[in-house]
Structures are given as structure tokens and as C-alpha cells.
Image (tube, rainbow, N blue to C red):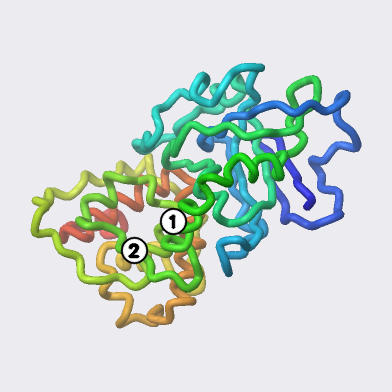
Amino acid sequence: MNYVIDRLGGRFLAYAPFMKLPWQKDKADGPLMKIRAAVMPMTSRSRVDLGYSENNFTVNSISTHLVNLQPLEPGQTAEDVAPFLPGTVNQGSWMMTAEDASARNLQQVKFNAPNWVSKLVVSHVSSYERHIDIPVWADGNGNIQSVDVDSMLAELEPRRKKASEVWGKQEGILSDFHQIAQAPKEIFKVAKTLAAFPGEIFGAIKDIKNSEVKEDLTPMELVPKEERPDLSQYPPVDGLSYQMMVGFQAKPETIAQSEYADRKRMMAAGKAWNGRIIADPKLARLFFCDVDRVKKGASASWEENE
């Protein structure tokens, strides 16, 4: 397989086998060495390219995975350098600043591997999943040239079965997707599920019972206008506007009566919006706020009087 990488802050182009891409060097700075690199969250300079290869037909289908990696010194582990505890959820801003990323020599890496790998090795904007470091090839200056995918897969093999089960429930094309929440409040409490929203929101949603949870009915405060994103940068996707996306998230039962009752259409448009929300913290904050307010009968941001 052909693996390609980019330094943090670069812009990815679509993956194409056997074609030299702009960020690829003719040769590394000296002989390559196998080292360990820790998986870190995305940062304020990260750019997620939705044009990379993705194939969710089976758990073993090959997709392109995107990670932020910090090269480790000999003997170091991901736990030694991690700034967060496993399961830490982003509270509305970037988890790592551009300055932090530079100081840590974070490098953004792409590699092709089976889908189940994403449940163990992944960089999220919204959470720090776990301490994990993987084998990579780097030059003498610590510039990562590629992921040693074969060695990584061998290391992850003991966890493959469980990761495959999780992937199948959350992302498999034939899966009966789990509900988005046992209680709606959990949507906002557990932001790390953001990456799986399209499957969970627009899949086979069953009856939601909240009998054991006392929900806070007070709506969130509106996001100040000066702190909102420019929504003109986010036009509708296949006719699905930001306002409609918020409405469907707040009241999933309305999807069946809409033109997006077609599951494939809803999944495709929802996934595109999901990528936007993950990549823009301002949009994520506004989205969660508007969903909470609409759900609780309050006005949304676009309903304000000028």
C-alpha cells in the first residue's frame, strides 16, 4: 500500500496511488529509523479533507485514516507525553493550540488500513480517546515519513475483534445504528460521539425513554453574535440547510415526514455537515446551542431580531 503524510497545517489533496503529491519529498533527510509516535487530538491548525478514500462496505475494507502524531523519544510512551486523561471531552474550544502543536512537533499523517483501525487509532477534534502510540518511519530530524502499518496491525490484533464489533454497530453500512442517547442531555454531555452522529441520528432511531433521567429544561444561552461562524460559508448540502440540520437533530422524528426520509440521502448530507461541525469549533458551539434551544422550545440563533 502507498502511504502519504503531511506536516501539520498543510492542506491534503485526494489520495491517489503511485502519484507524487505536493508534500512528498524525493527523499528523507538521512536514513529512516523506526520510532514510536503518540496519537494526539486535532489542533486549531488541523484541516480535515473529506476527499480522502473511505469505504465502509465491510469492517475490513480499506480506508484512509487521518491522525496527529507526536514523535516519541526512546523509552517514552503516549501516556508519558499525553496532556489529557483518556476520555477527555472538548468543552467548546480546540484541545491543543497551534503553539502546543509546534512545541510538540505534531505531524499530521495519512495511512491506509482496515476500517476497524479507526476505533483504536484516531484523532478527534472533540475528544481524547485513549493513550496509544504506533510504529512509524522517521528521518534523523524526527520527520515522520510513513506509518509502519504492518507492524501496527500486528500490535492491534488482540483488540481487532472488539474494535470490529464497535465499528459494525456504529458505522457499518448494514448496521442497526444505536440510538443517539438514552437521554437527550447526553448529546451535549458526551461530545465525543460527534464523529458518529450521522449514523446514530439518522439511522434506525427507536423509542427514547427518559424515565430515569431528570432533564434540565433550561435552554442554553444564545451564542453571542461576534462569536458565531459565518454561515454563508456553509451552504446547504443536497438541499439540507443548517436550520434543517438543527431541526432534525432536535426532533429526529420529523425526518420521516421530510424529503430526507430516504436514509441514504440523509446519511450522505448529514455526514457532510458532520465534517463541517468537526472542523470548525465555532460552528460546533453554535450547532449544539441551537439544537438545545430548539429542543426545549426556545428561539434559535437565526430567529433573533436584528
Give the farthest residue toward the right.
26
Determine contact: label 1, label 2, CB under 8 Å: no
Q: Position of residue 154 (x, y in %)?
A: 64, 43
Q: Quadrant of residue 292?
A: bottom left
The residue identified by callout 2 is 178
Q: Residues within 10 Å of mark 1 (few under 14, many from 20)?
A: some
Q: Residues within 10 Å of mark 2 (few under 14, many from 20)?
A: some
Q: Residue at x 21, y 46 (%)?
A: 220
Q: Residue at x 51, y 62 (%)?
A: 272
Q: Between residue 5 and residue 147, name the one nearer to us.
A: 147
The residue identified by callout 1 is 166
Q: Position of residue 30 (x, y in %)?
A: 88, 24
Q: Quadrant of residue 74?
A: top right
Q: Quadrant of residue 231?
A: bottom left
Of mark 1 and mark 2, the one earlier in the sequence is 1
| 137, above or below 212, in the image | above
